[in-house]
């Protein structure tokens, strides 16, 4: 199956994470992968992970017959996005990126610090912009075909999680703008809201409330989100561009 091209996926550090589900799905479709993670963030938030989750995810993907490399790097560093794109391109023809990383530390209007605000915007919004800028170097001057794809995971959560929600709003506009501005050069860029997926961050009350608000009667899983990403990265998904999409079982309609 090898030879389709390479996709960069950020935020692939925990087996329970959405990024891991996306990586496995895209590997099953035959994509070569560069998987980025930053375990100091997971540890800072106390997110449960195995000691070797990032490498184990990569091994699971390799077992599906594709080449996979792993890169530990902090996307809060403005030099990292460009280096990740270069590393992905070195694996083979670059075909896109899935941005599933985030910074998310709860705070509200009166207790958010400047440092937290800046960190959220650096990781959630600035890194996306810099990744897209780096990807643009691999676009032709003109193309009506879908040459490169970008899918960024977002959220509409904002109250009591102000810097996260505000920076995700900036992410949405950044990605959609890129799809419009670079569409005639072959970029297809979309934002995907997965709704509540229990990857280890929910307590019992959050889980119960999310379940009650999700019409099918269950929470989403990483593989649910991966299915839509796989479609957007496929030939069949090439006409979808500059959209904010939902894959949340109808949670946002409640």
Image (spheres, rainbow, N blue to C red):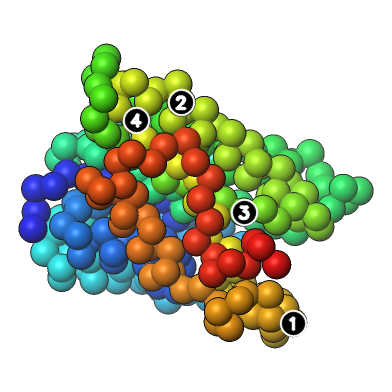
Q: Is 247 or 170 nearer to us in this picture?
A: 247
Left or right: residue 146 compared with residue 116: left
Residue that carries the numbered disc 3 in the rendered image: 155
Residue 25 locus on image (x, y percent): 29, 64
Left or right: residue 33 compared with residue 206: left
Q: Spatial distance from mark 1 to mark 2, Cα to Cα?
A: 40 Å
Residue that carries the numbered disc 4 in the rendered image: 187
Q: Spatial distance from mark 3 to mark 4, Cα to Cα?
A: 22 Å
Q: Mark 2 and mark 1 in contact (Cβ < 8 Å)?
A: no
The answer to whether any part of residue 102 appears in the image is no
> Mark 4, mark 1: which one is toward the viewer?
4
Q: Quadrant of residue 54?
A: bottom left
Residue 177: image tag: none
Residue that carries the numbered disc 2 in the rendered image: 180
Residue that carries the numbered disc 1 in the rendered image: 205
- Neighbourhood count class around disc 4 (C-alpha, 10 Å): few under 14, some 14–19, many 20 upward: many
Residue extending furthest toward the right: 110
Residue extending furthest toward the top: 141
Q: Is 189 or 54 nearer to us in this picture?
A: 189
Nearest to N terminus: mark 4 or mark 2: 2
Label 3 SS: loop
Label 4 SS: strand
Q: Spatial distance from mark 3 to mark 2, Cα to Cα?
A: 21 Å
In the depicted structure, whether residue 217 falls above or below residue 251: below
Nearest to N terminus: mark 3 or mark 2: 3
- Neighbourhood count class around disc 3 (C-alpha, 10 Å): few under 14, some 14–19, many 20 upward: many
């Amino acid at each position: 199956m090898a030879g389709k091209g390479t996709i960069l996926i950020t935020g692939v550090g925990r087996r329970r994470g959405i990024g891991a589900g996306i990586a496995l799905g895209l590997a099953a479709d035959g994509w070569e992968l560069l998987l980025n993670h930053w375990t100091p963030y997971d540890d800072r938030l106390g997110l449960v992970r195995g000691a070797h989750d990032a490498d184990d995810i990569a091994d699971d993907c390799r077992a599906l017959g594709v080449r996979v490399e792993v890169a530990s790097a902090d996307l809060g560093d403005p030099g990292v996005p460009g280096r990740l794109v270069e590393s992905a391109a070195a694996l083979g023809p670059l075909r896109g990126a899935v941005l599933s990383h985030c910074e998310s530390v709860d705070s509200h209007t009166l207790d958010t610090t400047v440092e937290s605000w800046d960190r959220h915007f650096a990781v959630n919004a600035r890194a996306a912009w810099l990744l897209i800028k780096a990807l643009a170097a691999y676009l032709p001057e003109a193309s009506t075909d879908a040459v490169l794809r970008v899918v960024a995971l977002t959220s509409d959560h904002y109250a009591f999680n102000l810097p996260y929600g505000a920076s995700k709003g900036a992410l949405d506009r950044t990605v959609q703008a890129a799809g419009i501005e670079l569409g005639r050069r072959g970029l297809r860029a979309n934002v995907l809201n997965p709704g509540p997926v229990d990857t280890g961050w929910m307590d019992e009350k959050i889980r119960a409330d999310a379940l009650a608000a999700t019409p099918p009667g269950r929470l989403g899983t990483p593989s649910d989100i991966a299915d839509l990403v796989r479609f957007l990265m496929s030939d069949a998904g090439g006409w979808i561009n500059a959209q904010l999409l939902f894959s949340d079982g109808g949670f946002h309609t409640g």
